[in-house]
């Protein structure tokens, strides 16, 4: 039976995170934005709360609290500042990728450094996107050529979270060009690898305190042991990785949507027109009611999506619930943030009010992992009973043509 009531542990954790996010992240959101980084002090404080390894199983060195708890944590952090989780080490895609794609030994080795006391300064990255996708064949342009004792990676990746900060990167590359999306591999590339070059940081519309950038691989040598094979079923492992990471991003969209709604409701109570609060005009009251419904429904779908994974449901059920949750959360966050700007009138456009930032952050977050359109496509494929085509999984161009 599904219970919508958080456990006592979850209440304690979310209460602590919520207090922290409101007292430490929210008042400094503009400072992080201007500095294009979350301050070391805030990163240290989050690390001391011990949150980043929450969803990682205990056997792999995490806390084993499950994906539901991880979505709750990310939602609360985002309620303080939706951009901040993108600037916090350990909250990105890397740990989920290590967990899902590595063998137990590989995963433990990749995750362990994030539990160290100094880990507030340690970032990881996962690189799948490419600036120039392949037009001639299915698969990544970046290749991994088999050489004696390992692989040589050559290519370029774009939009990579933490590209310039990461000490270790998990890079997707084409091992077998003829096998299309079935011929992809994942490889661990260390920052010190002489074949790896960080090719600059993107300047972005929102989420400024997150670092997004490009990397270039020039015959970067990775040993055989640096290939992550997903415990035998690489496609299923990649699916779990992208689905779970997208759910975490969706949880941040829920936090953003709640914040946009709460700020708007408060403003509509204070701002008066024709002698009464603007929230008492029916049009605005209905908008507020609808956006509240949006935020609540997005939260429930994200929780339900996370629950399917924690409960060990069939992959199809997990994917459908995840795709619905992610697609809905992206749309909801954008509606809530857009209406928040509108309800604030001219003030909504000004930098001294948070809502303009929420609109920019929501837009950018909707492109951070799988997009709403890509998730619609995945949901439709599951509903139609199509086999789990690897072309459905990677959120990159050329992969999303399964239903055309
Ligand atoms: C904040 C942020 C963080 C990111 N982090 C990382 C990272 O850490 N590592 C990394 O490798 N990449 C990262 N990315 C890249 C991100 O995964 C991609 O930008 C995203 O998946 C969309 O892919 P694309 O940009 O290639 O768009 P495209 O795939 O070219 O899509 C273009 C548009 O078409 C839509 N579309 C695609 N397929 C279909 C379809 N079948 N039907 C209808 N519409 C469709 C898309 O939704 C989108 O609106 C990040 C991006 C952002 C903005």
Image (spheres, helix red, strand yellow):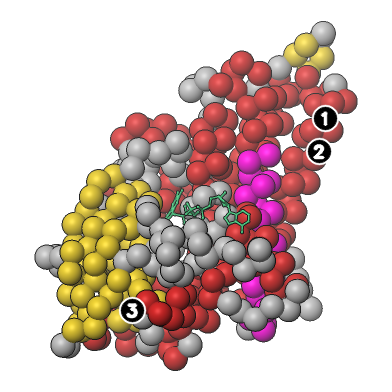
C-alpha span from label 3 to label 2: 51 Å
Residue at the image point whose x is 36% and y is 80% from the top: 176
- Residue topped by disc 3: 175
Distance in Å between CA atoms under marks 1 and 3: 56 Å
Quick one: label 3, few (<14), some, or many (20+) residues within 10 Å? many
Q: Nearer the viewer, residue 149 or 301?
A: 149
Residue 312 visible in the picture: yes
**Image quadrant in which the C terminus is located:** bottom right
Kindly identify which numbered label has been placed on residue 289. 2
Is 171 within the magenta? no
Q: Which mark is residue 29?
A: none
Q: Secondary structure at mark 2?
A: helix
| First along the sequence among labels 3 and 2 | 3
Q: Which mark is residue 285?
A: 1
Residue 268 higher or lower than 156, as above or below: above
User: Residues in magenta?
Assistant: 313-335
Q: Nearer the viewer, residue 210 or 402?
A: 402
Label 3 secondary element = loop
Query: Is residue 236 shown left or right of residue 315?
Result: left
Circle 2 crowding by C-alpha within 10 Å: few under 14, some 14–19, many from 20: few
Quadrant into which the N terminus falls: bottom right
Task: Give percent across and percent down for residue 358.
Answer: 55, 36
Q: Quadrant of residue 215?
A: bottom left
Circle 1 residues within 10 Å: few <14, some 14–19, many ≥20: some
| Residue at far front of view | 136
């Amino acid at each position: 039976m599904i219970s919508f009531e958080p456990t006592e542990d979850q209440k304690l954790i979310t209460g602590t995170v919520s207090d922290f996010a409101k007292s430490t992240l929210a008042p400094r959101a503009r400072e992080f934005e201007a500095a294009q980084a979350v301050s070391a002090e805030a990163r240290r404080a989050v690390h001391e709360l011990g949150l980043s390894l929450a969803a990682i199983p205990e056997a792999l060195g995490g806390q084993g609290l499950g994906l539901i708890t991880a979505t709750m944590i990310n939602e609360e952090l985002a309620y303080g500042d939706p951009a901040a989780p993108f600037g916090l080490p350990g909250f990105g895609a890397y740990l989920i990728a290590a967990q899902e794609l590595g063998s137990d030994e590989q995963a433990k080795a990749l995750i362990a450094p994030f539990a160290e006391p100094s880990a507030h300064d340690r970032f990881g990255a996962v690189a799948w996107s490419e600036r120039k996708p392949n037009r001639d064949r299915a698969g990544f342009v970046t290749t991994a050529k088999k050489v004696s004792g390992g692989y040589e990676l050559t290519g370029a990746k774009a939009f990579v979270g933490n590209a310039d900060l990461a000490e270790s990167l998990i890079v997707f590359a084409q091992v077998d060009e003829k096998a299309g999306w079935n011929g992809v591999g994942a490889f661990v590339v260390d920052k010190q690898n002489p074949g790896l070059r960080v090719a600059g940081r993107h300047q972005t519309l929102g989420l400024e305190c997150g670092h997004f950038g490009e990397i270039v691989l020039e015959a970067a040598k990775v040993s055989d042991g640096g290939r992550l094979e997903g415990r035998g079923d690489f496609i299923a492992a990649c699916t779990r990785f992208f689905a779970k990471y997208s759910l975490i991003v969706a949880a941040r969209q829920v936090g953003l949507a709640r914040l946009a709604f709460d700020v708007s409701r408060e403003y509509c109570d204070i701002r008066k027109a024709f002698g009464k609060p603007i929230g008492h005009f029916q049009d605005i009251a209905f908008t507020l009611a609808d956006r509240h419904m949006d935020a609540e429904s997005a939260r429930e779908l994200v929780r339900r999506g996370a629950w399917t994974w924690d409960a060990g449901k069939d992959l199809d059920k997990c994917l459908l619930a995840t795709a619905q949750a992610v697609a809905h959360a992206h749309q909801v966050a954008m509606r809530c943030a857009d209406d928040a700007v509108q309800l604030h009138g001219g003030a909504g456009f000004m930098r001294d009010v948070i809502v303009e930032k929420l609109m920019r952050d929501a837009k950018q977050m909707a492109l951070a992992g799988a997009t709403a359109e890509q998730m619609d496509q995945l949901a439709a494929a599951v509903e139609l009973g199509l086999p789990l085509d690897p072309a459905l999984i990677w959120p990159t161009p050329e992969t999303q043509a399964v239903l055309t």
